[in-house]
Image (cartoon, grey):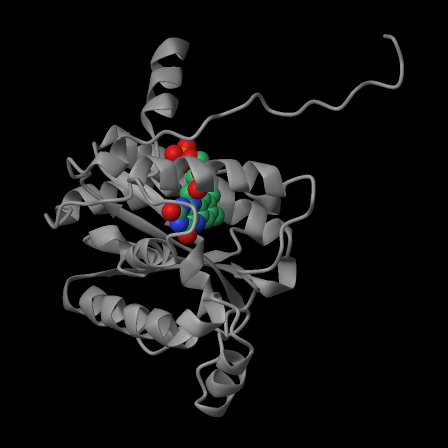
Amino acid sequence: MRSNEFTELLKSRYSVRDFRPDPIPEQTLAEILDDARYAPSWSNTRGYTLAVASGAQLERLRGAYVAEFDAALGMYRRKPTAFVKAALTGRLPDGDFKTWGRYPDDLRPRSVKVGVGLYQHLGIERGDRDGRDAWNRRNCEFFGAPTVIWVFAHGGLLPFSAQDAGLMMQTLMLSATAHQVGSCALGVLATWRRLIDAEFDIARPYKLLTGLALGYPSEAAVNQFRADHPPVALARSRTTS
Ligand SMILES: Cc1cc2nc3c(=O)[nH]c(=O)nc-3n(C[C@H](O)[C@H](O)[C@H](O)COP(=O)(O)O)c2cc1C
C-alpha cells in the first residue's frame, strides 16, 4: 500500500450517524475484529474486552437504552427534581465514568464547535430543545446500527488500558472502513452500566469506556457532515536546536 492510499483510507473514515438496517455479514465482522488484534499495546497487556451485540440482543439493548434516555431526560435538562426522582426510582446513571461533566475550558470550544456544526447541518435551531432531545435520543437508538460494540478497559491499568483500547478502536474502525463498513463511537452509551451487564458477563475489573456502532451508512443528510481535523498540537521547544 502506498502512503497516499493510507491517507485516503484515513480520510474516508468519518462518524456515521445514520445506518441502513442491513446486517454486517458474519465473515466481514469477524475479519474486522481479527484486524483489531494488530493494535499496539502497553507491555502487550491488551487490557480491554469487547461486548459485541447484534440481532435480537441488540434490539433489547436499543429498547433499554431508549427507555433509560427517556427516563433521564429531566436530568439532561438539569431539572433539580429529576435527580431526586431518578435516585428514588433507582435510575441514576451508573456508568463507571461520568460522561456528562463540564469539559476543561481550553477544550470546550472544540466540542462546542462540532456540536454547533452538527446541529446546523441537521437544521436544529439553537433554542430547539425538543429537536436536540430527539437527536440525542437517536444516539441511544445507536443511529439504527445493526451491530454495536461496548468497549471496556481494565480498571487496574488505567490510563494505559484506556489508551490501548483507543488504539484498538481506531485499528478496528479503519479496518471497518476498508471493508466499506461505517462506524461511530458512542461515548453516551457509557452513561449506564447496568444495561450492558444485563446482557453480558463482564468481569468487574473492566470499566465501560464507550460504545461503537458499526454498519452500512444510509443516504441521510447527516452522513454528509464532516468535522474539521485541525493539525495535531505540537509543544513549543524550550531550546533552539
Ligand atoms: C470515544 C468517542 C466517543 C464518541 N461519542 C460520540 C457520541 O456519543 N455521539 C456522537 O454523535 N459522536 C460521538 N463521537 C464522535 C466524535 O464526535 C467524532 O469522532 C469527532 O467529532 C470527529 O469527527 P469524525 O469521527 O467524523 O472524524 C465519539 C468519538 C469518540 C472517539
Q: Quadrant of residue 7?
A: top left
Residue 142 point in image, percent of width and height:
28, 55
For residue 168, say whether it is visible. Answer: no
In x, y percent, where is residue 222?
27, 38
- At a point 18% along the width and 53% down the height, the residue shown is 146
The tally of labels here is: 0
Quadrant in which ligand 1 is drawn: top left
**Residue 44 screen position, x and y as percent:** 56, 46
Left or right: 67, with 22 as reference point: right
Q: Residue furthest left?
A: 22
Which x, y percent locates residue 240?
88, 8
Pick the quarter of the image with the N terminus.
Answer: top left
Q: Is residue 108 above or below residue 95?
A: above
Q: Nearer the viewer, residue 204 or 59?
A: 59
Q: Nearer the viewer, residue 228 or 160?
A: 228
In the picture, the quarter occupied by the C terminus is top right
Comparing 154 with 65, the one in front is 65
| Residue closest to the eye, 186 or 131 | 131
> Is residue 50 in sight in this rendering?
yes
